[in-house]
Image: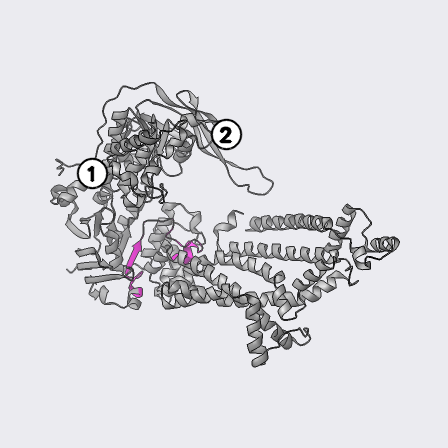
């Protein structure tokens, strides 16, 4: 088990190093000079040169890469070209919205999907199965921004249970959670639909395994056999999908952020790209890569906990 | 004395199809009743019906009494209390019968905890006792072991431990040794016999293998198409064989293919000092890969028209050697030549040599693409030819190949699902035969077949060898089959050929102690004064 964790950890660090290099190179070759973009097309060449020096754009590329990586290691992500404020603060502000939102959506989707998938698999071919399966069709098919608008129309405008948008800050946790609830539901719906289908088909496969018959022969009821022997075996593919979904929810929520006027990470990336704020783009993308790789690492650990066969080979 | 288990006129139909037809049998405490017959005869259905584990769509009639309880009248909840406590069950496939994510201790203790209010600690202590009883002592097999850390035979012991943990009165074993090697099979059979004696357990043993049946059972019931056709005390049954089906089964089990004498031609296949290592995963990131020698310094020849057998238990290197002979894998050292040319050169199989060697695999169901017609399937080897026949020549080749294996030309337009297991194996042989190879490798080619079908396929192989002067290498774990179909046999163990000689000599006077053990462990059919073949 220790060797397994060590191997996974080595892979994690290597991927981060490669990712940082790729991100840096891609952003460097993108056209557009941030200094001339910030000063406008009528700027004097010496003013542009002065700004380039101030932004640290005049040193050689290798030096800039090392400065960037070195800075990130001590928590210094540089200074935004456009806003002239530290990137780490900007990202931290946004992360306090995007991370709780992603976690809420993920928790919601898992809480819906696992019981629904188990129900459908246990009653395969029955009414409950048909109901769950057609619900997941809807979940996959409905665009989530439209579903978000329906939620706003019902719960914010008609019933006035939740705010229709904006974020009040974490000074009042109850209000903050309230304003994240509708966006989390909107994000969770399609994810829950996909996860339900994965859970169902994975469990159906497991229910046909020989060891499920062995469990019944021991005297376990159908239900006991399913929960004690079926579920844990069926969870492995589900974990993979949960890992993928978390990465997507963290940065891919831009449309929902837009619908609910949430200043999240997705919007930050979008704005920085359109304003050539390269240092912010680099840092946020790096952060997302870090999040994805870390989540994959955790999923790998979860595999090893769920399945003892994986502990030995890595 | 009333019987422990009494089955009276048990009939089962699934969606209108009758799978069991008025089955009646009884077992006393401490008695072993064997239920035998070919696949699809209803043996497993009978077991599942007794356990109350039939599929939901099944309709059951008749009576099943365990002691005084009518099992068919019990509710599902009551049956849960009986299963595992009063009736234990052991299944065929030990590799998949255990939950891979739970330790063996957990799985054995579960049987105990489901049926009693034993604490976790008591259940674990009892599990340790039971595992020791089935031959898995705690110092070598602690409760925390996972199934993937055990061999097939050891896993089957765990399954048996689960089934007997609560000292049930009846144990049902469904083909408990079919997936195991002969020496392991002998140990498991011995264990089951001992348990019956020491625990007073009644054993309902389901198996297709008459040799196993004759050694184990006190009484035998023979099933055919959902009915019991004959039922008697073992010695009487083998002495009388009153039903023609029983006689046919017995004759097929003891079948000896007709091998004509041959004049040995020139050496065709020459395997010289062949070794093959596999790289194992590194123990830590900076270590060199450890090597596992799967085949070690193997040498032998096969002459044109010769019929050679290769026997050995699982993991002995048979498959690795086969792949190397077929030119599918490189060798680590040594040389394999057919007609003087290497079978593998420049990192790929030698196409000119591949035409001369064809192969027939074990699984008649998995080795055909279900979406292709027979015509296309059996002409697959034509891609090895520079100028594959077209038009009428191709049609003729297909017809000839199909007729050679006892099928008809009309079968060319069918899909594989239209054929039975035995017929598919004929198709596989037709596919191998169509480009007229000099050597065919049969890799466990009859192991998945019922005895009567197996006897027919063995006759077919012997006949084809006679007619076409075909040499073959017959690889099998089944000693009696190898004996009936080969002139010469090689015995393989841990990658080495430990004994090599004429088949009759090796079987009658084995020299190597491993061969002696193998032959001693293999179950044998009783010798009968006279055999009637209907």
Give the labeled residue for mark 1. Answer: B252
The magenta region covers: B80-107
Residue B135 on image: x %, y % = 36, 48
Marks 1,2: beta carbons within 8 A: no
Residue A44 on image: x %, y % = 87, 55
Please tell me which of labels 1 and 2 falls first in the chain: 1
Give the labeled residue for mark 2. Answer: B347
Picture quarter containing residue B286?
Answer: top right
Residue B466 on image: x %, y % = 25, 25
Q: Nearer the viewer, residue B531 or A32?
A: A32
Q: Is residue B100 magenta?
A: yes
Taking the spot 66% from the left edge, 66% from the top edge, the residue there is A264
Please tell me how crowded label 1 is: few (under 14), some (14-19), or many (20+) other residues with Cα within 10 Å: some
Residue B429 on image: x %, y % = 30, 34
| Mark 1, secondary structure of its residue | helix
> Magenta: predominant secondary structure element?
loop
Q: Which mark is residue A213?
A: none
């Amino acid at each position: 088990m220790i060797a397994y964790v060590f191997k996974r950890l080595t892979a994690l660090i290597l991927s981060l190093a490669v990712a940082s290099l790729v991100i840096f190179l891609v952003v460097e070759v993108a056209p557009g000079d941030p200094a001339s973009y910030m000063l406008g097309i009528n700027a004097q060449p010496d003013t542009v040169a002065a700004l380039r020096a101030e932004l640290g754009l005049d040193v050689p590329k290798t030096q800039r890469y090392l400065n960037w990586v070195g800075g990130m290691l001590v928590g210094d992500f540089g200074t935004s070209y456009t806003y002239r404020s530290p990137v780490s603060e900007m990202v931290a502000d946004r992360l306090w919205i995007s991370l709780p939102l992603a976690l809420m959506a993920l928790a919601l989707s898992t809480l819906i999907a696992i019981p629904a998938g188990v129900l459908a698999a246990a009653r395969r071919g029955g009414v409950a199965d048909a109901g769950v399966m057609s619900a997941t069709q809807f979940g996959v098919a409905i665009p989530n921004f439209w579903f978000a608008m329906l939620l706003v129309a019902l719960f914010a405008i008609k019933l006035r249970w939740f705010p229709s948008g904006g974020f009040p800050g974490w000074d009042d946790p109850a209000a903050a959670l309230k304003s994240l609830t509708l966006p989390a539901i909107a994000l969770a719906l399609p994810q829950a639909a996909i996860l339900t289908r994965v859970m169902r088909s994975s469990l159906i496969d497991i229910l046909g395994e020989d060891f499920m018959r062995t469990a019944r022969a021991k005297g376990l009821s159908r239900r006991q056999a399913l929960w004690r022997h079926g579920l844990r075996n069926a969870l492995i593919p589900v974990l993979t999908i949960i890992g993928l979904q978390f990465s997507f929810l963290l940065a891919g929520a831009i449309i929902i952020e837009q619908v609910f006027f949430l200043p999240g990470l997705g919007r930050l990336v979008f704005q920085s790209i359109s304003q050539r704020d390269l240092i912010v783009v680099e840092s946020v993308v790096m952060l997302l890569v870090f999040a994805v790789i870390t989540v994959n690492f955790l999923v790998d650990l979860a595999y090893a906990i769920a399945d003892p066969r994986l502990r030995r080979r890595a | 004395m009333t019987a422990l288990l009494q089955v009276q006129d048990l009939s089962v139909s699934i969606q209108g199809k009758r799978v069991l037809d008025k089955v009646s049998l009884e077992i006393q405490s401490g008695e072993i009743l064997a239920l035998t017959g070919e696949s699809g005869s209803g043996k497993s259905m009978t077991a599942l019906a007794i356990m109350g584990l039939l599929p939901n769509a099944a309709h059951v009639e008749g009576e099943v009494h365990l002691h005084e309880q009518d099992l068919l009248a019990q509710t599902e909840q009551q049956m849960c209390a009986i299963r595992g406590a009063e009736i234990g069950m052991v299944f065929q496939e030990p590799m998949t019968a255990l939950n891979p994510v739970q330790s063996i201790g957990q799985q054995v203790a579960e049987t105990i905890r489901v049926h009693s209010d034993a604490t976790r600690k008591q259940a674990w202590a009892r599990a340790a006792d039971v595992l020791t009883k089935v031959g898995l002592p705690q110092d070598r097999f602690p409760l925390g072991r996972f199934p993937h850390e055990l061999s097939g035979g050891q896993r089957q012991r765990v399954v048996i431990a689960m089934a007997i943990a609560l000292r049930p009165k009846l144990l049902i074993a469904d083909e408990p040794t079919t997936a195991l090697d002969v020496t392991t099979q002998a140990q498991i059979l011995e264990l089951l016999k001992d348990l019956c004696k020491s625990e007073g357990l009644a054993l309902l043993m389901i198996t297709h293998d008459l040799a196993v049946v004759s050694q184990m059972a006190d009484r035998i019931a023979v099933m055919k198409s959902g009915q019991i056709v004959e039922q008697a005390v073992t010695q009487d049954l083998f002495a009388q064989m009153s039903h023609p089906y029983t006689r046919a089964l017995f004759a097929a089990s003891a079948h000896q293919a007709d091998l004509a004498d041959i004049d040995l031609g020139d050496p065709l296949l020459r395997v010289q000092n062949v070794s093959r290592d596999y790289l194992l995963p590194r123990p830590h990131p900076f270590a060199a890969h450890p090597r596992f020698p799967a085949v070690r310094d193997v040498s032998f020849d096969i002459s044109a028209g010769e019929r050679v057998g290769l026997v050995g238990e699982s993991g002995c290197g048979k498959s690795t050697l086969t792949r190397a002979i077929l030119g599918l894998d490189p060798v680590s050292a040594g040389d394999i030549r057919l007609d003087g040319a290497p079978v593998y050169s420049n990192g790929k199989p030698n196409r000119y040599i591949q035409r001369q060697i064809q192969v027939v695999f074990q699984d008649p169901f998995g080795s055909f693409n279900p979406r292709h017609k027979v015509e296309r399937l059996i002409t697959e080897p034509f891609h090895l030819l520079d100028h594959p026949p077209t038009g009428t020549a191709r049609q003729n080749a297909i017809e000839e190949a199909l007729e050679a294996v006892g099928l008809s030309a009309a079968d060319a337009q069918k899909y594989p699902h239209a054929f039975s297991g035995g017929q598919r194996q004929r198709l596989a042989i037709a596919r191998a035969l169509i480009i007229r190879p000099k050597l065919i490798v049969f890799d466990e080619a009859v192991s998945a077949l019922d005895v009567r079908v197996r006897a027919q396929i063995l006759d077919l192989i012997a006949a084809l060898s006679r007619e076409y002067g075909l040499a073959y290498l017959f690889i099998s774990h089944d000693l009696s089959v190898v004996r009936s179909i080969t002139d010469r046999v090689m015995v393989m163990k841990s990658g080495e050929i430990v004994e090599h000689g004429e088949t009759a000599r090796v079987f009658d006077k084995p020299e190597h102690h491993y061969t002696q053990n193998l032959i001693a462990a293999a179950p044998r059919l009783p010798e009968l004064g006279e055999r009637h073949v209907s």
